Image: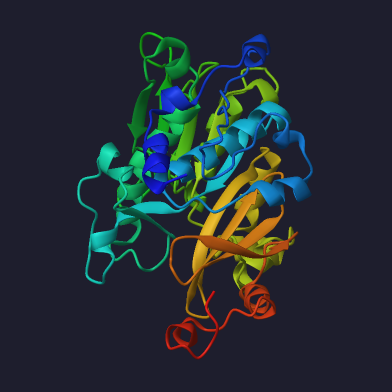
Amino acid sequence: MKLNSLLCLLSSSSVASFAPPSQHKANNALFLSAEPTTETAVPTATAESSASTPTNMNDILQIPLSYNEMITQSTQAMSDAYRTQGMSRQIVRILLPRDASSDQLGVQFEPDAQMDKGKNDEMKLVPCDESWQGGIMQLYRAASPTTKDILRQLCPTGATTGVPPKIIEDRSVDESGVDGVGLFYTQSGSGSIEKNTNSGVGFGFFGESVSLPTLSENDMCVFVQPTQEVVDIVESLSTSSMNGSSQQSSPLIALLNPQWRNVDDALDSASKSESVFGAFASFLGGKGSSLRKLEELGYRSTYTLEGYVCKGGNIRLLKRYDSDWLVFAENDNGDKYLKVGTSMERPTYQDVEKMLNDNGVGYKYERDLGLAGKF
C-alpha cells in the first residue's frame, strides 16, 4: 500500500479503530481490542494471536514507524494482557514523540504539546535518553499527551457511547514539582471520582498525604515516569483499587516509563538481596526493594519499546509480555527497521553488537563511505 494511504488510515480516530466485540461485553471485559485490517503497517495481536506461542508472536511484531502505530501496538499489548492473562498491574516502556526540527543540541523544552501535532508526520519517536536537553520535564511534556492518547485508546466508553473519557491529570504525586512524575486517570462515570484521603500516603516523615482517586470498574490510571519514591503511593492505590475483588477483575493501573533503568548497576544488584547489606544498598538508591514490592503487587512488563545506538546505527528493542526480546536495526535509507536477532533474556549491548556482526552489518560510517555493504 502506498504511504499516503497508510498514514490516512493510522490518523483515523481511536474510537473508530476500536470496536467492542460481543464476547468482551459478555465477559464484562475492561478493554476493547483493535480489529485488524489488511492495511495496518504494524501487525497487532488478534484474539487468536494473543494466545499463540512466543515464536509466533516473534514473527508478527514489527517496529512502529509512526506515533499512531506505536500507540496502537502498545495499547493492543496492554489490552491483550488484561483480557487473556488478567494482568491488571502493568509496566510499559515506550519511545516519546518529538518534533524532528527540534532534534538538535540546545533545545531546552518542547513547544506546547498538541494532540494533532503529536500524530503528525513531522514527529519522530525518540528514546528517553540524554538527547532530551530539557531533562526529565521535557520528557514529561512529551509523555503527557502520549498517556492521554493511550487512555483514550483503551477506555471502552469512547466506542460504546461515542464520548471520549474524561482524563484527569494529578501532579500532587510529584512532591518537588520538577521530578517529571504524574498520575493520569479516567473518569467514565457521571459525577466526580471520590478521593481517598485516608490512605496515609505521604512524602518523607512529615509530608502531606496524597489524595488518591477511587477507581470504578471501567476506569484506569497510569503513573507517568514514576520514581522509587512514588512506589508507596503506587502500592496504596493498587491495594485500595482491589475493593475485595481479584486482581484480574480490578481496574488497570500501569506504570509508564519508570525512571529506574531496565539494566542493573552494582548498587541495583546488591539491593536485590534481602540481607542487611541489600537493605543498605536500597537505602543508597538501589532499586531492588522497590522492584520486589512491585512484583508482590503483581506488576509485570507487558510492552517495551526502547532504543539506542550501536555501531553508529539506531537500534530498537521490542518485547511484549508474550514474546521474546526482538532486536531491530535501522536500514541505511532510514525508512524501516530490520530484525537482526531474538533473545529470551534482555540482550546486552555486546549481544546486540554480535547480532549485527552475524548479519554482516558494519559500522554506519563505513556504510556511508562505501567501505562496507549497505544494510
Q: Position of residue 288 (x, y in %)?
A: 64, 58
Does 339 appear above or below 290?
below
Q: Residue furthest front?
A: 1
Q: Position of residue 207 (x, y in %)?
A: 39, 42
Q: Nearer the viewer, residue 36 or 125?
A: 36
Residue at figure coordinates x 36%, y 9% from the top left: 191
Q: Nearer the viewer, residue 187 or 284?
A: 187
Q: Position of residue 316 (x, y in %)?
A: 54, 62
- Quadrant hosting residue 269: bottom right
**What colour-coding does the image apply?**
rainbow
Does 340 appear above or below 295?
below
Q: Is residue 269 visible?
A: yes
- Horizontal relation, residue 114 to residue 265: left or right: left
Q: Is residue 201 visible?
A: no
Residue at figure coordinates x 30%, y 52% from the top left: 178
Q: Residue furthest bottom?
A: 371
Residue at figure coordinates x 25%, y 44% from the top left: 113
